[in-house]
Image (cartoon, rainbow, N blue to C red):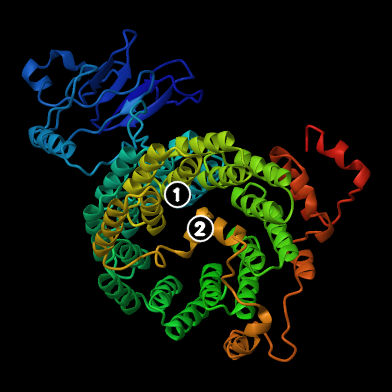
């Protein structure tokens, strides 16, 4: 049995309503408390009794006892909203609830303790409810595609060095999707690029907690960070945790093996690489690292077999082709090395390392024009890379003029002011030209970037030689000692210092320095210069400068002398489908860059003649097949603000 209540919520009328106003509508309710907003802002609950005949009157709850009112208090409703609340099962009578008072349930004390306990847990869970919204208006979790789009947006921003915007996006991703490890990895890498190692470590730690230690990518990135900071023991533990989280995570096995190689533990590294092959199957990076180990041990046949397996796993791996080419360069197989370089640029046409190493190789064996062309192609494809300009500047200094080399060095330093080898090579050239004061300034500029890197050790050694030739022997000794503090395994630095003491008549001191070097060498189990990665040779410093500019040395034989030896390896290349033995077909470089890269070989000097800010626009103009370029328009077009 229900009573009738008039409510002014609609314009329709009912004949059973005792109200004469036709705008009132009847609602039939059955013993339910009704919460109506009053003029004072309070919501008043009334209960309609069946015995009351007047529909406009009810029994207010204020007449009930105070104890009954405090038993249960429902949550407050928003103002101006008509809310119908059903009573609880335990009680047949509704209670009056004042605004702002909390509901007291029998389990409230237990829930409070659980809430306090949850706040102390290391695993965090962000708030996904809108606190200002009403009841039942919780925000739904966004779709996973939004996470993919946000991660891509952050990646694009980080490439443009807009790190703050990328960090804000990734922090929002972590707050919304705390269980996904990709946001932690991306944010940690961005913080690592900014040398915020503590913040990056905190992000990785939080990511491991949020993913409950089941994400191997977070463990592996954290291990790489600790390895970079010099915490070798901690890095080992983190790599181990990554392999436990997923034994098929190839990056963890390979990164751990490279760490052991840098520490001289070759046996341990081989064991880790063997486990990687066992759990993950054939992988190009594992085969490549094993091949480098065999090449360092002078087992060329085994190294070639492993390089072949690496290229079979991924024929588009430019790194494997380049590493294989390095092996053939060491074995003085120039024709085979050139064919492998061709395979490398075909696998990755825009790879700056491939064009740079190939150009240095051609310059070393005497093909200067081809070396210039290769480096110019690489610079046209990568106008923001300074290493290509540095290599080209060294070639121009040897075979052209020092002024042209200075122009290229200055442009390279403007492209990347924090690239130490550019300043070191430039200072070396100025020293050779007799500009000692300029060379000192350039060396000092290189050391102002960093004093703890391998490049800094080479810079100190070169500066020490300069001071030795200038007669400042005390300064030369200090520079040699500082260089050895950074890299105690440098044979060149130890022997140069010993030669200095021997020239000064200190034969006993020179012998002591040589003995110290051999004592230092005995502490290293195995030389890891080959295994640190073939990318280390891409950073040309004093050793590569010496190879390029020393006229008395020739590290590779002429092609005519090695033609018979190269023919023995042509069948090996035929298995890869790269070279045909009949006629020794080679890559048509001009046709290749026209069809694959949309570059005009006749206009490669355009990017070199432009300023660093205009190099990108000039490179885009070269890549446009429909662009019309006239020589007389060159200076005008490059001076326009939009170019």
From the image, which quarter does the C terminus lie in? Answer: top right
Q: Is residue 55 visible from the viewing direction of this image?
A: no
Q: Which residue is drawn at 27% across and 23% down?
A: 76
At label 1, counting other C-alpha atoms closer than 10 Å, the crowd grade (few under 14, some 14-19, many 20 or more) is: many
Q: State yes or no: discs 1 and 2 in contact (Cβ < 8 Å).
A: yes
Q: Mark 2 points at which residue?
A: 543
| Helix, strand or loop under label 2 | helix
- Position in image of residue 479 (x %, y %): 39, 41
Q: In the current view of this chain or complex, which residue is farthest to the front?
A: 505
Q: Residue at x 55, y 37 (%)?
A: 442
The residue closer to the viewer here, 429 or 611, is 429
Q: How many numbered circles does the render carry?
A: 2
Q: Where is 501 relative to 470, above or below?
A: below
Residue at 87 percent across and 36 percent down: it is 636
Would you name the residue on which mark 1 appears? 458
* Residue in view at x 61 percent, y 48 percent: 386
Q: In which quarter of the image is the N terminus?
A: top left
Horizontal arrangement in the rendering, residue 338 relative to residue 258 (left or right): right
């Amino acid at each position: 049995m229900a009573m009738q209540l008039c409510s002014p919520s609609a314009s329709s009328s009912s004949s059973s309503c005792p109200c004469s106003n036709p705008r009132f509508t009847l609602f039939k309710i059955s013993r339910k408390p009704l919460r109506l907003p009053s003029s004072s802002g309070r919501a008043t609950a009334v209960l309609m009794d069946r015995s009351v005949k007047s529909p406009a009157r009810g029994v207010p709850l204020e007449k009930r006892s105070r104890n009954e009112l405090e038993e249960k208090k429902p949550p407050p409703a928003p103002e101006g909203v008509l809310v119908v609340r059903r009573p609880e099962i335990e009680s047949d009578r509704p209670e009056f609830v004042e605004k702002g008072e909390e509901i007291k349930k029998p389990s409230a004390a237990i829930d409070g303790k659980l809430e306090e306990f949850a706040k102390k847990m290391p695993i965090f869970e962000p708030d996904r409810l809108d606190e200002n919204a009403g009841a039942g208006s919780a925000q739904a979790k966004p779709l996973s595609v939004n996470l993919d789009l946000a991660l891509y947006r952050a990646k694009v921003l980080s490439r443009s060095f807009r790190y703050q915007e990328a960090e804000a996006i990734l922090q929002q991703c972590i707050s919304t999707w705390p269980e996904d490890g990709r946001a932690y990895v991306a944010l940690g890498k961005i913080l690592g690029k900014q040398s915020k190692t503590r913040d990056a470590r905190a992000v990785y730690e939080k990511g491991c907690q949020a993913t409950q230690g089941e994400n191997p990518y977070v463990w592996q990135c954290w291990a790489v960070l600790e390895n970079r900071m010099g915490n070798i023991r901690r890095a080992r533990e983190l790599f181990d945790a990554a392999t436990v989280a997923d034994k098929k995570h190839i990056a963890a096995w390979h990164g751990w093996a490279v760490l052991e190689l840098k520490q001289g533990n070759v046996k341990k590294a081989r064991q880790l690489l063997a486990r990687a092959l066992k759990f993950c199957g054939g992988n190009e990076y594992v085969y490549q690292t094993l091949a480098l180990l065999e090449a360092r041990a002078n087992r060329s046949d085994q190294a070639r077999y492993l390089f072949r397996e690496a290229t079979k796993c991924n024929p588009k791996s430019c790194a494997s082709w380049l590493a294989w080419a390095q092996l053939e360069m060491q074995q003085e197989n120039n024709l085979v090395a050139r064919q492998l370089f061709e395979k490398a640029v075909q696998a990755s046409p825009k790879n700056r390392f491939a064009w740079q190493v190939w150009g240095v190789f051609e310059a070393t064996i005497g093909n200067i024009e081809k070396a210039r062309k290769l480096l110019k192609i690489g610079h046209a494809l990568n106008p923001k890379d300074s290493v290509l300009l540095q290599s080209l500047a060294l070639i121009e200094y040897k075979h052209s003029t020092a002024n042209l080399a200075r122009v290229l060095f200055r442009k390279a330093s403007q492209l990347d002011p924090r690239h130490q080898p550019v300043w070191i090579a430039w200072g070396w050239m100025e020293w050779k030209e007799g500009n000692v004061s300029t060379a000192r300034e350039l060396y000092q500029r290189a050391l102002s970037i960093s004093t703890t890197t391998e490049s800094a050790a080479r810079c100190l050694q070169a500066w020490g030689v300069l001071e030795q030739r200038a007669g400042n022997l005390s300064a030369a000794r200090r520079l040699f000692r500082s260089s050895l503090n950074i890299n105690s395994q440098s044979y060149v630095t130890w022997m140069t210092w010993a030669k200095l003491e021997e020239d000064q008549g200190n034969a006993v001191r020179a012998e002591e320095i040589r003995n110290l070097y051999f004592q230092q060498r005995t502490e290293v189990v195995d030389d890891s210069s080959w295994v640190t990665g073939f990318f280390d040779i891409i950073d040309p410093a004093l050793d590569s400068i010496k190879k390029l500019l020393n006229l008395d040395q020739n590290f590779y034989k002429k092609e005519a002398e090695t033609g018979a030896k190269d023919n023995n390896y042509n069948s090996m290349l035929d298995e890869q489908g790269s070279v045909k033995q009949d006629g020794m077909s080679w890559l048509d470089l001009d046709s290749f860059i026209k069809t694959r890269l949309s570059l005009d070989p006749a206009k490669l000097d355009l990017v070199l003649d432009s300023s660093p800010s205009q190099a990108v626009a000039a490179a885009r103009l070269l890549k446009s097949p429909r662009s019309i370029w006239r020589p007389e328009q060159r200076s005008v077009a490059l001076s326009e603000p939009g170019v």
